[in-house]
Image (cartoon, rainbow, N blue to C red):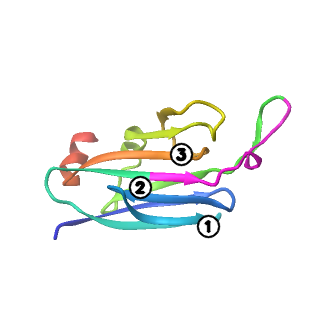
Amino acid sequence: MNNCLMSLVAQATGDDLCLEIKLDNLVKFSKILTTKPENIKFEFNNKYNVVHVIEIVLSGKQPNHTVIDNSGTILSDRVVNISDVCFDNIQLQQIFLDKTIYIHDFNGTADEIKSQFFGAMGCNGTLRFEFMSPVYPWLLENM
């Protein structure tokens, strides 16, 4: 079987945020995070001409996790940083940032939006990253 290894690091800036990662609707990781970095790895079938979808879902963010002063400046916040995204140890951080959609509703304070992802999840919501296998030709086309 021709498998590919996907890996990434998730790190929360505080305890009790939950992260779930799905590949093609199958849960590959689910855990309440701490401030310790989580090195997450899972394999998938790298067969020809298949569209895959990675969804990274953040939950557990509460209004008290964000401290704002009287002028609206954020003094502290609880977020999850996603970094070191790789296929078979090949860094794809910029491709991941460029091609990931962040879907959230500002924790229920606004209408749902779809925006670009810049590396940190600060609202409950879903990152959606779509790619094609086999990954090597897809990477060449998207670099």
Residue shown at the point (73%, 49%) measured from the top left = 65
Camera-side mark, 2 or 3: 3
49 left or right of 131?
A: left
Closer to the camera in the image, 133 or 140: 133
In the image as oriented, which residue stretches furthest toward the right? 70
Q: Residue 135 carries which label?
A: none
The C terminus: image quadrant: top left
Q: Distance between the residues labelled 1 and 3?
A: 21 Å
Q: Residue 125 carries which label?
A: 3
In the image as oriented, which residue stretches furthest toward the bottom? 1
Q: Are marks 2 and 1 in contact (CB under 8 Å)?
A: no
Residue 9: % across, % down: 49, 60
Q: Is mark 2 on a helix, strand or loop?
A: strand
Stretch in magenta = 56-70
The N terminus: image quadrant: bottom left
Q: What element carries label 1?
A: loop
> Neighbour class for label 2 at 10 Å: few (<14), some, many (≥20)?
many
Question: Disc 2 or 1, which lies upstream in sequence?
Answer: 1
Q: Distance between the residues labelled 2 and 1?
A: 17 Å
> Neighbour class for label 1 at 10 Å: few (<14), some, many (≥20)?
few
Residue shown at the point (58%, 59%) measured from the top left = 18
Residue shown at the point (18%, 49%) measured from the top left = 137
Residue 12 in which image quadrant: bottom right
Residue type at mark 2? Val
Residue type at mark 1? Lys
Residue position marked by numbered label 1 in the rendering: 36
Closer to the camera in the image, 77 or 60: 60
117 left or right of 4?
A: right
* Residue 37 visible in the snapshot: no
Residue position marked by numbered label 2 in the rendering: 85
Q: How far apart are marks 2 and 3 (CA)?
A: 19 Å
* Residue 30 visible in the snapshot: yes
